[in-house]
Image (tube, rainbow, N blue to C red):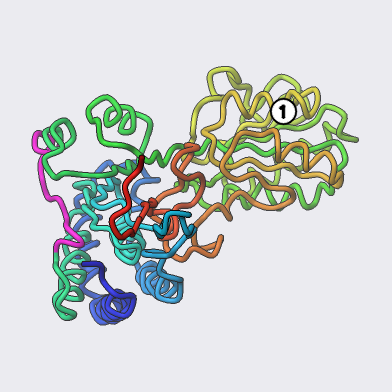
């Protein structure tokens, strides 16, 4: 039986209250994880840390999903067959979803909230570095489900080792309908090679900005710097392409390089960039183009024109987000159609590629594939469809 929207929302209301009431317990458990982090990469530490702001963010994500329409059971189309049958196409959940993720305890809330309200059961496989935080959060989930007499298997945490994980992937021991891997290319490629279960790929960033020759350069500076306002997120900017016909190109490169350095960025560049400013370090551009930095690094290069910029982005980006900064609306529209990314911006920061910013509330992933869905994935995207046909004995001749 499907859960009613009222029942789902009651679970979520209780979950939000439990998170608020147990904020200190969540942060204390997270402190244990941070103490054990050791030499963990700084960007992963940033994702791992839970403070009052992150706890409030968890509560806020639950509240946002509470206000969203429940997609389960929605009728997409209906057809009265000439023979008297009623043919309906309805929204149904995937079923059992596994999400594999690293470092971010807030995913334990956000991913499960979206999956639960859309009618799915979710299995959470967090990284060992966040184990204490995740166990506390899943315990709050269990309390909210139990209080509303809803089966606790709607949200399960897989506290299993590498061998058991490999067995789960290769033999589908948990009868999964969908796997969402959130992590680096190594993790994603390993899962692709290990399982036959369908995947929804939450891929890498490696996002680009193209600064057109006709541009408000003060705006360009703001958007580039905002794109590096957080280093550990997949919607951060790594590469900036300057049109060679940008007026006072050298002067403007030097200016934005200085601004980038002022906020602690390491500016890398090609020969033309390095010749424009001593701040930039000469880089092996070909080697760095495919790399997602997740660090203070930012690469500046000069490109001959918009066509070349588009080709460069389509060749090297992770298919996540790309930006054009220009006063030329026609050029912007062409860029947005031709660049093969999930989100393509004109005169706005890539940092907005986020389920909450797009009105979804919590997100479970940002899909960089074209099927089943592309871009931020919330409860409205964690569903499939199914045909419901009702008759009174019709047969086909």
Residue plotted at (60% across, 22% down): 283
Q: Residue at x 37, y 74 (%)?
A: 59
Q: Quadrant of residue 288?
A: top right
Query: x%, y% of residue 352?
Result: 58, 55
Q: Is residue 250 magenta?
A: no
Residue at 65% over, 51% down: 349
Q: Secondary structure at mark 1?
A: helix
Image quadrant in which the N terminus is located: bottom left
Residue receiving disc 1: 309
Q: Is residue 75 above or below residue 252?
A: below
The one nearer the camera, 395 or 202, is 395
Q: Position of residue 281 (x, y in %)?
A: 62, 27
Q: Is residue 328 left or right of residue 292?
A: right
In the displayed orientation, state which residue is furthest to the front: 397
The magenta-colored residue range is 153-165
User: From the viewer's perspective, is residue 147 above or below residue 261?
Assistant: below
Is 117 placed left or right of 317 in the picture? left
Estimate how packed mark 1 is, as few (under 14), some (14 to 19) or many (20 or more) residues with alpha carbons within 10 Å.
Answer: many
Residue 263: in sight, yes or no?
Answer: yes
Which quadrant would the C terminus be assigned to in this image?
A: top left
């Amino acid at each position: 039986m499907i859960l009613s929207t009222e029942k789902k929302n009651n679970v979520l209301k209780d979950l939000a209250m439990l998170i608020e009431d147990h904020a200190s317990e969540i942060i204390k458990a997270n402190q244990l994880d941070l103490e054990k982090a050791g030499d963990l990469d700084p960007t992963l530490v940033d994702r791992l840390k839970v403070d009052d702001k992150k706890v409030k963010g968890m509560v806020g994500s639950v509240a946002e999903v509470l206000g969203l329409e429940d997609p389960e059971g929605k009728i997409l189309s209906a057809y009265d067959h000439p023979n008297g049958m009623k043919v309906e196409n309805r929204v149904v959940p995937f079923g059992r979803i596994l999400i594999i993720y690293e470092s971010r305890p807030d995913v334990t809330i956000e991913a499960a909230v979206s999956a639960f309200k859309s009618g799915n059961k979710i299995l959470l496989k967090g990284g060992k570095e966040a184990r204490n935080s995740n166990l506390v959060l899943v315990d709050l989930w269990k309390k909210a489900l139990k209080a509303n007499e809803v089966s606790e298997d709607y949200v399960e945490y897989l506290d299993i080792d590498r061998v058991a994980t490999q067995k789960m992937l290769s033999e589908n021991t948990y009868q999964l309908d969908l796997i969402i891997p959130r992590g680096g290319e190594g993790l994603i490629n390993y899962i692709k090679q290990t399982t036959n279960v369908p995947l929804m790929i939450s891929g890498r960033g490696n996002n680009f900005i193209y600064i057109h020759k006709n541009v408000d350069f003060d705006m360009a500076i703001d958007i580039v710097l905002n794109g590096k306002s957080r280093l550990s997120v997949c919607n951060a900017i790594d590469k900036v392409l300057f049109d060679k016909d940008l007026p006072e190109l050298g002067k403007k490169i030097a200016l934005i390089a200085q601004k980038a350095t002022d906020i602690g960025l390491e500016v890398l560049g090609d020969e033309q960039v390095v010749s424009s400013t001593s701040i930039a370090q000469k880089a092996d551009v070909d080697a760095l183009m495919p790399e997602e930095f997740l660090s203070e690094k930012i690469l500046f290069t000069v490109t001959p024109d918009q066509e070349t910029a588009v080709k460069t982005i389509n060749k090297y980006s992770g298919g996540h987000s790309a930006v054009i900064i220009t006063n030329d609306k026609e050029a912007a529209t062409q860029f947005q159609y031709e660049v093969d990314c999930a989100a393509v911006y004109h005169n706005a920061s890539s940092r907005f590629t986020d389920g909450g910013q797009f009105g979804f509330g919590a997100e479970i992933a940002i899909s960089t594939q074209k099927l089943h869905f592309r871009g931020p994935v919330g409860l409205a995207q964690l569903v499939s469809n199914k045909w419901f046909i009702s008759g009174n004995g019709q047969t086909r001749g």
